Amino acid sequence: MKQDKAVAVFNTLIKINNNRMEGYETASKETTDADLKSLFFHLAQASLKCKRELIYDIRKMGGEPIEGEGSFSNTFSQVWKDIKGVFTQNDRISLLNSCEYDENIAVDAYYEALNNNLEFLGSEQQTLLNKQYLSISAGLSKIRTLRDSLVEVHS
């Protein structure tokens, strides 16, 4: 029972990382700015690394990792579809605002996983999720810093 719950938590986070990867791939297509393309590539790669670690641990627990895409209302791809027609291709602030919104969802999901499931997670699993949480939080911080610097310039 305890292991089943841990597997379910990890599978939820795999969905989050799938959404992040899809979102950053789409965001990269929505800009021509090399610095944003680089940032989005690195954040997508960080998501892939998180996903691989989660899959590895699920298998180690004897569980079955989910397959396919994310699902949380497919937040990332829906946001990109919504903004694609509304904003110009090079609207950096809008693009970063959308990324920030989506990263907040990921940070919140990790925070909830860590704080609401401690009794189901072993110390190694908690350590892994904490490491990933800090990595995603750092990505969010980069996005905010870049966005805030642009907002100051345009104010």
Image (tube, grey):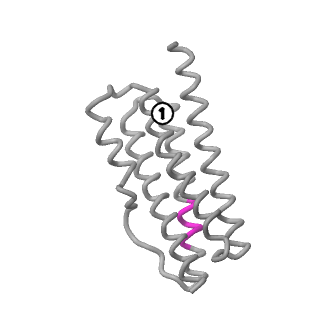
- Asked which secondary structure carries label 1, the reply is helix
The quadrant of the picture occupied by the N terminus is: bottom right
Q: Does the magenta portion include 111?
A: no
| 21 sits left or right of 53 in the view | left
The one nearer the camera, 32 or 3, is 3
Q: What percent of the width, then of the height, locates residue 31?
A: 40, 32
Residue at the far left in the pictured view: 85
Q: Which residues are magenta?
A: 49-55
Could you classify mark 1 by the number of other residues whose Cα lies within 10 Å: few (under 14), some (14-19), or many (20 or more)? many
Q: Position of residue 5 (x, y in %)?
A: 55, 78
Residue pictured at 54% horizontal, 57% vertical: 109
Amino acid type shown at disc 1: Leu
Is 59 situated above or below 9? below
At x 63%, y 55%, the residue is 133
Majority secondary structure in the magenta region: helix
Q: Is residue 9 above or below residue 27?
A: below
Q: Which residue is mark 1?
A: 96
Residue 16 against residue 124 in the figure, above or below: above
Is 38 in front, or is 114? Answer: 114
Q: Nearer the viewer, residue 106 or 143?
A: 106
How many numbered badges does the structure rendering display? Answer: 1
On the image, the x and y values in percent for residue 117 come to 62, 70
**Residue at 51%, 74% in the rendered image:** 8
The picture places residue 154, in percent across and down from the top left corner, at 50, 14
- The image quarter in which residue 27 lies: top left
